[in-house]
Image: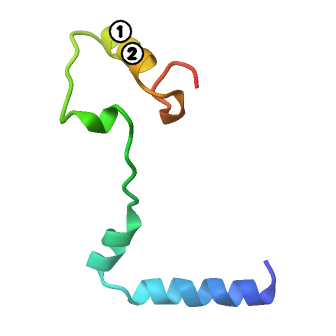
Amino acid sequence: MDRTGREDWIRDFEAAGRRTLEDRLKYAFIRTYKPVLDDEPYRSFDSMDEYRRWCEEKLPSWLGYGRTI
């Protein structure tokens, strides 16, 4: 990192340190729609095997819930 980049990083870090805890929490999490997972309030399964099968069949692989990505 060059000197200018480091100075920018330090200024950003110090500005973040002056924010309230409420503001830090507000901007700390990025809400992202997750297909299928966010479409229902909850799901229940009788077994872990049933849950894993459902994940592999219903969820996009990029969400990382399958046995292999």
Q: In the rendered image, which residue does mark 1 sit on?
A: 49
Specify few, some or many for label 2: CA neighbours under 10 Å numbering under 14, 14-19, or 20 or more.
some
Task: Report, in whole angstroms, how far the alpha carbon at label 1 lies from the one at label 2.
Answer: 5 Å
Q: In the rendered image, which residue does mark 2 sit on?
A: 52
Judged left or right of residue 13, residue 45 is: left
Q: On screen, 28 above or below 40?
A: below
Q: Which SS class for mark 1? A: helix
Query: Quadrant location of residue 20?
Result: bottom left
Q: Nearer the viewer, residue 48 or 60?
A: 60
Query: Quadrant location of residue 42?
Result: top left
From this viewpoint, which residue is outermost toward the right? 2
Q: On screen, 8 above or below 61?
A: below
Percent of width and height locating residue 9: 63, 83
Q: Quadrant of the N terminus?
A: bottom right
Q: Are marks 1 and 2 in contact (CB under 8 Å)?
A: yes
Specify few, some or many for label 1: CA neighbours under 10 Å numbering under 14, 14-19, or 20 or more.
few
Counting every numbered tag in the picture gives 2
Query: Quadrant location of residue 2?
Result: bottom right
Amino acid of disc 1: Asp
Q: Residue at x 40, y 90 (%)?
A: 18
Labelled disc at residue 67: none
Judged left or right of residue 62, residue 5 is: right
Q: Quadrant of the C terminus?
A: top right
Q: Which SS class for mark 2? A: helix
Amino acid of disc 2: Arg
Judged left or right of residue 15, residue 26 is: left
Q: Residue at x 42, y 15 (%)?
A: 57
Q: Nearer the viewer, residue 51 or 13?
A: 51
Percent of width and height locating residue 32: 40, 51
Q: Nearer the viewer, residue 64 or 37?
A: 37
Judged left or right of residue 5, residue 52 is: left
Percent of width and height locating residue 6: 71, 84
